[in-house]
Image: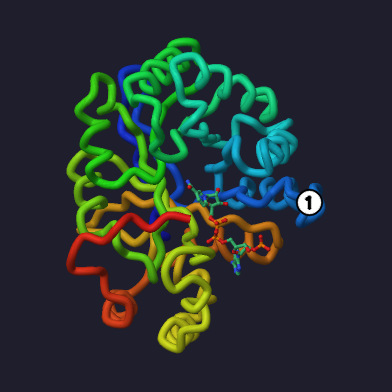
Amino acid sequence: MAAAPLPRVRLPATADQPARDLPAIGQGTWFMGEGLAPRRDEVRALQQGLELGLTLIDTAEMYADGGAEQVVGVALADRRDSAFLVSKVYPWNAGRDSAIAACERSLERLKTDHLDLYLLHWPGNIPLEETLEAFERLRESGKIRRFGVSNFDVDEMAALHALPGGDDCAVNQVLYHLGSRGIEHSLLPWQRDHGIPAMAYCPLAQAGSLRRELLSDPEVLDIAAGLGITPTQLLLAWAIRPVDGRRDVIAIPKATRPEHVEQNAGVLAIQLPDEALARLDAAFPAPERKTPLDIV
Ligand code: NDP
């Protein structure tokens, strides 16, 4: 029997970029570069993830004040082309000129000449038109390939989409896990209608409602044990499950411990049976009305 294809999410084509398929599990970097773990362990974890197919790496100028980007830069020093590299700009650095300077500082720390995707970290006070103009200039100069946003709720996505160039937004990165399903009410359907995939942050419930309780929930433990997978693998496989036959969520767990990286990469080979999905739905139903966007 042929192996099931690896779960992938398609970023749509833009004016100058072809459509791009990415593995549905990537790697986060929040809290890397803070000295919480030896730098060599963080570098090795990212390289191990790349080797196991977790080719998307998510970072931000915010993390460890640029320290996480430096860790990523070391990890990618001899293998930049094997990664799809994502970084984010602070909202107060997202002006017409300041976003360009912020991106150049990120590139310097990352020791690369381009980002594959550059995100506005959360909505701020600088008019979006200015940020879009900066992103466009960064694209023209080859410093970024695509742009996107993070922590945008549905009204903010609609407002962005209505602006000139706003419809090229590649992704919206938002908090999403089994215990925090608010985006399923209107944000995810809106993004699906507009062909904009989501990147799920805190997919292991490091934050958001229910937080770590999820990983000791009896139903989660029982379903995971029945499938012979870990509770964290169950959470990740759930986050990237296809909806109506289509996958459009990429989960970006952060892991430093080698066994965590290995388990997270193992999720690329897991297909959750319908019965498990139904049990999780019953135990953790999606909200029936609009709820405020969960953020860290
Ligand atoms: P996660 O939900 O990914 O949880 C990370 C924690 O889970 C770490 O303590 C890690 O431990 C642990 N872990 C990872 N894999 C496993 C495993 N297989 N089994 C058990 N424990 C595991 O939370 P994050 O907050 O890090 O979110 C993921 C990423 O999303 C961030 O790193 C960042 O890149 C992005 N993010 C974006 C935000 C935004 O506003 N756009 C906000 C927050 C996050 P260890 O490291 O010891 O292996």
Residue 125, horizontal then vertical, whole percent: 39, 31
Label 1 residue SS = loop
- Say whether residue 275 is left or right of residue 261: left
Q: Is residue 272 left or right of residue 186?
A: right
Measured along the vertical axis of the image, is residue 266 above or below residue 121?
A: below
Residue at x 26%, y 39% (from the top left corner): 157
Instruction: Tell me what residue is drawn at x 73 percent, y 31 percent.
Output: 77
Is 284 drawn above or below residue 256 in the view shown?
below
Which residue is at the front of the view, 119 or 62? 62
Judge the density around disc 1: few (<14), some (14-19), many (≥20) Cα neighbours within 10 Å: few
Is residue 6 among what the camera can see?
no
User: Is residue 111 shown above or below 219?
Assistant: above
Total marks placed: 1
Screen quadrant of the N terminus: bottom left
Residue 17 seen in this snapshot: yes
Image region (quadrant) for ligand 1: bottom right
Task: Say which quarter of the image contains residue 170.
Answer: top left
User: Which is nearer the eye, 210 or 78?
Assistant: 210
The percent coordinates of residue 225 (x first, y second) are 49, 85
Residue 91 x %, y %: 47, 33
Q: Residue at x 66, y 52 (%)?
A: 31
- Residue at horizontal 23%, vertical 57%? 245
Q: Amino acid at mark 1?
A: Gly
Q: Could you tell me residue 105's position as x and y percent?
A: 64, 23
Q: Does residue 282 appear left or right of residue 121 in this picture?
A: left
Residue designated by label 1: 35
Q: Quadrant of residue 134?
A: top left
The colour mode here is rainbow
Q: Residue furthest front?
A: 125
